[in-house]
Image: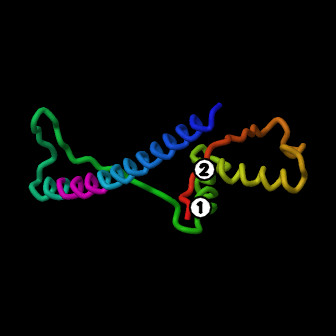
Amino acid sequence: MEQTTIFQMADRLRELQEQKKEREAQVKALTAEIERLDLQLSDAMAEAELAKFTRNGSTYYLKSRLFASPVAGRKDDLMVILKAHGYGSLVTETVNANTLAAFIKEQREATGEDVPAWLDGTVNTFEKVSIGIRKSQ
């Protein structure tokens, strides 16, 4: 492959990554504006005691969503309590994918094996090669 073709691909990759960054910033700004306006509208509707209304073919309504999480430092206690009260099906053990990848990388460096023998057949690994770009000084 000619060097000019490689340079053209590199330029296009950089251009696309810059476009992606710009659009991500736009999405972030839009999300913040949506959240701000959503809060204002829901407050106004609650103040007006208006549960729903229709405007230009769309129905707007108040909805509520509950979020719950363990108290800081009490996750293990919560799991024990849930199991003790017959709700063990809510408790799941997980391994974070990034943490597992870091562990496998450490094991490779320590043992020289792709995957430790004791994990053979239980862990899939693959490496993705991509292009890194940084601005030159």
Identify the amino acid type marked 2.
Gly
- Picture residue at 37% right of the left edge, 47% below the top: 23
| Position of residue 4 measured from the top left corner of the image (x, y, whole percent) | 57, 37
Q: How many marks?
A: 2
Identify the amino acid type marked 1.
Lys
Position of the N terminus by quadrant? top right
- Picture residue at 16% right of the left edge, 56% below the top: 46
| Position of residue 83 measured from the top left corner of the image (x, y, whole percent) | 62, 51
- Picture residue at 90% right of the left edge, 52% below the top: 111
Tell me: 39 left or right of 112: left
Can residue 124 be found in the magenta stretch? no
Tell me: 17 left or right of 108: left
Q: Nearer the viewer, residue 124 or 69?
A: 124
Q: Nearer the viewer, residue 132 or 5?
A: 5
- Residue at mark 1: 75
| Position of residue 42 measured from the top left corner of the image (x, y, whole percent) | 20, 54
Which SS class for mark 2?
loop
Q: Nearer the viewer, residue 126 or 18?
A: 18
- Residue at mark 2: 132
User: How many angstroms separate mark 2 from mark 1 (CA)?
Assistant: 38 Å
